[in-house]
Image (cartoon, grey):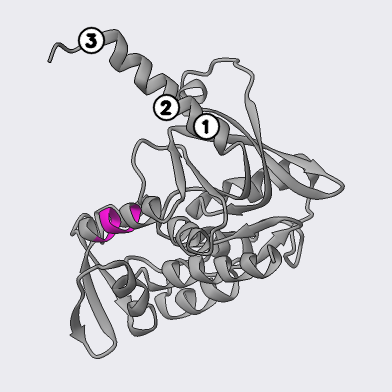
Amino acid sequence: MKLDDTLISKAIVEEFMKDFLKFMEVDVAIVGAGPAGMITGYYLAKKKRKVVIFERKLSVGGGMWGGGMMFNKIVVQKTAKPILEEIGVSLKEYKKGYYIADSIETVSTLSSRTVKSGVKIFNLILVEDVMIRKEKITGLVLNWNAVSLANLHIDPLAIRAKFVVDSTGHSAEVARIIVRKLGKKLFTETGDLLGEKPMWAEIGERLIVENSKEVYPGLYVAGMAANAVFGAPRMGPIFGGMLLSGKRVAELLLERLK
């Protein structure tokens, strides 16, 4: 078989554009393909909701790849164990209630199961703005991350979503856009991002689930973005709260999408 270089290029461009056009109007748009964002998408897509995730980096998985200080192991607690078992990640009990998983296996398995559930992930895309109609977030404004890195002035494109999830980690990028563009209108004590507190795994893991909720009409926060918005501690290399946070946001959105 003789390979045609131009045909290869045409296949990539044509099929990418089909996907991009298909996911320009969705039930839920998730910003950030870390563990919380992918789990949110996974549980939504299992219930046949149309979900897209935009990730500005080349790779998905957030900070989970590196485990703790580049030791590629992660810890999850007993309450999050069923989520990893469901998607097929191998777990080893270290001490009672503490389970160890390989970070590489976890991210690769989670990303595969998320995509196979029906979620579409676009990497290298930056969310630079939001669309607001009648004081509700109704979509996202997108550009290539390379455009931002090169400091080029290139106008963006927009997609429509019934709901948006900010799972951008410590930076809480979408919530930050709301404050910068509209003022202190978040559902926090001050209306502003309260900022994450110093590491305290026990409190951080508990509060991250409580904080995983709507933070502005149509906008939910999941994962570390939830604690960054509501002023709770970071947790370090224990990831059960991230998984439970993503599942909780999916459950809340499924109720809203009925």
Q: Amino acid at mark 1?
A: Phe
Q: Secondary structure at mark 3?
A: loop
Residue wearing tag 3: 4
Q: Is residue 188 above or below residue 159?
A: below
Residue wearing tag 2: 15
Q: Amino acid at mark 2?
A: Glu
Residue wearing tag 1: 20
Residue that appears at 45% across and 66% down: 234
Residue 232 in the image, given as x and y percentages of width and height: 55, 69
* Prevalent SS, magenta region: helix
Q: Which image quarter holds the N terminus?
A: top left
Residue in front for this viewpoint, 169 or 138: 138
Q: Which residues are magenta?
A: 106-111
Residue in front for this viewpoint, 27 or 146: 27
Q: CA distance from mark 1 to mark 3?
A: 25 Å
Q: Which image quarter holds the C terminus?
A: bottom right
| Disc 3: CA contacts within 10 A as few (<14), some (14-19) or many (>=20) | few
Residue that appears at 37% across and 53% down: 116
| Disc 1: CA contacts within 10 A as few (<14), some (14-19) or many (>=20) | some
Image-based side of 41 in relation to 102, left or right:
right
Residue 44 in the image, given as x and y percentages of width and height: 53, 61
Q: Is residue 60 above or below residue 7?
A: below
Q: Amino acid at mark 3?
A: Asp
